[in-house]
Image: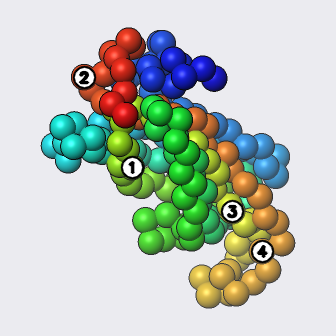
Amino acid sequence: MTSDSLNTPPAGHASDRRGSVATTPFAGGLVRVQATPVFLPDQSDPDEREYVFGYRIRITNSTDRIVQLLARRWTIVDANGRTREVEGEGVVGRQPILGPEQFFQYESFCPLPTPWGTMEGAFSLRAREAARVGETASSLLDGPWPENFEARVARFYLVAAEVGVNAEAKA
């Protein structure tokens, strides 16, 4: 990637098309991760090179297993090409459990020193067979979780509302 391409948002990424969808095949089904970003002008201060972006993540379990999100990993790149890695347990203080055909949705934010950047990453999950008749919540959690996998989060673009395709990032 050239330095010019780092200083301008990619062409064709208008505000209604910055999100992403990724599907991870698993256990005869899919785990789908959809990301929808939004610029938060009321929490940003461009004069101080502080741009804050919110994002909504929706994780859908379309497998025949119960899955639990254990951890997250993000790669965040600003318009100057600076990369930051973020890892941690769960999301927004939770490690949600999703049954077949269930989804979990949450919102978070990402501050950047430039008016645009990207995020991508993965969720670490574990899986087990669906609950059996008579199985309690505690036996479900204490029982075996023999399968581990990662669900990819496709790259999505964080773009301040006033940034055009030919705008330059502030250093």
Residue 60 visible in image:
no
Which residue lies under the disc numbered 3?
125
Residue 35 location (% of width, % of height): 49, 40
* Crowd rating for badge 2 (residues with CA inside 10 Å; few <14, some 14–19, many 20+): few
Which residue lies under the disc numbered 4?
145
Count of all numbered marks drawn on residues in the image: 4
Residue 17 location (% of width, % of height): 44, 22
Q: Earlier in the sequence, mark 4 or mark 1?
A: 1
Q: Which is closer to the viewer, label 4 or label 1?
A: 1
Left or right of 75 in this view: 127: right
Estimate the spatial distance between the alpha carbons at disc 4 and disc 1, rounded to whole Å: 32 Å
Give the number of the disc on residue 162. 2
Q: Is residue 143 above or below residue 18?
A: below
Work out whether residue 89 or residue 32 is closer to the camera in this orientation and state it.
89
| SS state under label 1 | strand
| SS state under label 2 | loop
Q: Amino acid at mark 1?
A: Cys
Estimate the spatial distance between the alpha carbons at disc 4 and disc 3, rounded to whole Å: 10 Å
Residue sitting at 54 percent across and 58 percent down?
A: 86
Q: Earlier in the sequence, mark 4 or mark 2?
A: 4
Q: Is residue 129 above or below residue 35?
A: below
Q: Amino acid at mark 2?
A: Glu
| SS state under label 3 | strand
Residue 30 location (% of width, % of height): 71, 44
| Discs 2, 1 touching: Cβ within 8 Å | no
Q: Amino acid at mark 4?
A: Trp
Residue sitting at 77 percent across and 74 percent down?
A: 145
Q: Earlier in the sequence, mark 1 or mark 3?
A: 1
Residue 122 location (% of width, % of height): 64, 51
Which residue lies under the disc numbered 1?
110
Q: Earlier in the sequence, mark 2 or mark 1?
A: 1
Q: Is residue 160 above or below residue 32?
A: above
